[in-house]
Amino acid sequence: MTTASRSLGRAAALLPLSLARGASALTGRRPRRARTLLHAAVGLPLGALALVAVGVEVLLVLRGLLYGFVEPGPYDHSWGGPSLAGAWLAHAAISLPFAAAALGLLWLVAELDTRLGAHLLRGERPGAWAWPAALAACAGGAVFVVAWVHQPEPRPRTAPDG
């Protein structure tokens, strides 16, 4: 397994991993209990952000790359329509850059967890960008989720007049 795929997997599992870190710090006799709890607390919003990125990846695969299997049609008003091939190609092409961005976000979350964990647990310098990037990424993720939840309902398709 490559380093990048390991980082992506660790980022995707960061929320339950942070919960386990916190539980082990509370129940065990660790020498740096407060630092471990702080690392777990910092990992919770980063793990939630990673789950948003994983959800976006799943959605992009289902609604982009597998569009023809999940959307029964008609494709008259779909991007790339009116044919299935055109709609499928348009949705797949649009999903690819967003899928790359979501993978980049997962990599960033893994890097932030590594750097902030080294800072909190061992006192290493995380770099001037790590804390501001973590705050900005988590705030951006929260704004994204709120905007997603409050988006308007799609209008039902109506039969053409005629």
Image (tube, grey):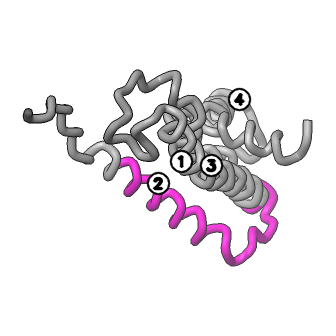
Q: 10 Å neighbourhood of mark 3: few (<14), some, or many (≥20)?
A: some
Q: As rendered, which of 123 and 67 lies closer to the eye? A: 67
From what the image shows, is residue 157 above or below residue 96? Answer: above
Residue denoted by label 1: 49
Q: Are marks 1 and 2 in contact (CB under 8 Å)?
A: yes
The amino acid type of the residue labelled 3 equals Leu
The x, y position of residue 89, in whole percent, is 57, 42
Question: Mark 3 to mark 1: distance in Å?
Answer: 20 Å
Question: Mark 3 to mark 4: distance in Å?
Answer: 44 Å
Question: Mark 1 to mark 4: distance in Å?
Answer: 28 Å
The x, y position of residue 59, in whole percent, is 51, 35
Q: Mostly what secondary structure, the magenta segment?
A: helix
Bounds of the magenta span? Answer: 119-145
The label number, if any, that marks residue 96 in the structure image: 3
Residue denoted by label 2: 141
The amino acid type of the residue labelled 2 equals Gly
Query: In terms of image quadrants, where is residue 21?
Result: top right
Marks 2 and 4, the one that precedes in the sequence: 4
